[in-house]
Image (tube, grey):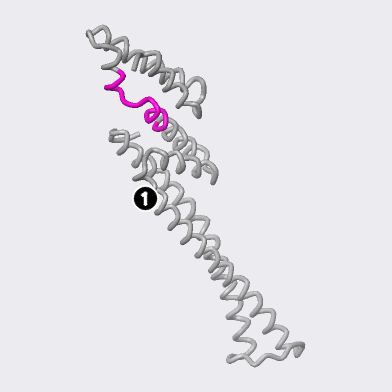
Amino acid sequence: MQKYEFLNKLDISLHALSETDRKDILSDYEEHFVIGISKGRSEEEIARALGDPKVLGREYCAISLVKHAEEKPSVGGIGRAVLATIGLGFFNLIVVLIPLVVLIALLAALLLFGFFLFCFGIIMFGCSFLDIFGILTLNLPVSPIASIFFGVASVCFGLFIILGEFWLTRIMYHLGIRYLKWNIAVIHGNDSL
């Protein structure tokens, strides 16, 4: 592959990056060609040594999306970063996607459990309150006063879980970013990004 063809393919594969970033990366690779040619290497040898420009472009796009998700946390940002990282290889489908799906399922289950406790507590509190005033007659295994306390405790515990879920999600988001960066570094062959 000639220099022009390599740089053209690399430019096309860097479509997700800003114009400035694309120019910087292309300039760096053009410099590789200049240095290689000055040492007597052919353009084909240099292109072969640099690797597949499409793969390089996907790696740079994944790195950029992970950094963007780190700087501006959002569900869409982390989603794009995960998809870009998965696109780096079939192995990432297993290494990135499966832990992500398991983590989302666990967080969703915890959130549903907290919401269930919250709603159950409100219903228990309301029914016990109505039972005390004789508006609704319930055959509860405990006294209506104890049911009110159980209801309040359930509401509080449910709120605690829901609020803790947001804190836990933030921590998992940052750990996920670190995991994606590590994964890209391993694929890219660098120690760190």
The quadrant holding residue 147 is: bottom right
Residue 97 in percent (x, y) is at 42, 50
Image point 39% across, 42% down: which residue?
180
The quadrant holding residue 140 is: bottom right
The residue carrying mark 1 is: 94
Horizontal side of residue 46 vs 18, given as left or right = left
Up-down: is 67 above or below 121? above
Residue 50 in percent (x, y) is at 30, 22
**Relative to the observer, which residue lies in front, 156 or 158?**
158
Horizontal side of residue 63 vs 114, given as left or right = left
Disc 1 residue type?
A: Ile
Quadrant holding the C terminus: top left
Q: Secondary structure at mark 1?
A: helix
Quadrant holding the N terminus: top left
Boundaries of the magenta span: 47-59
Up-down: is 131 above or below 106? below
**Relative to the observer, which residue lies in front, 100 or 171?**
100
Residue 170 in percent (x, y) is at 48, 51
The quadrant holding residue 11 is: top left
Q: Is residue 7 magenta?
A: no
Image point 66% across, 77% down: which residue?
123
**Relative to the observer, which residue lies in front, 145 or 185?**
185
Q: Name the dominant secondary structure of the magenta segment.
A: helix
Q: Is residue 57 magenta?
A: yes
Count neighbours of disc 1 (C-alpha within 10 A) and say few if under 14, some if 14 to 19, many if 20 or more. few
Image point 37% across, 45% down: which residue?
92
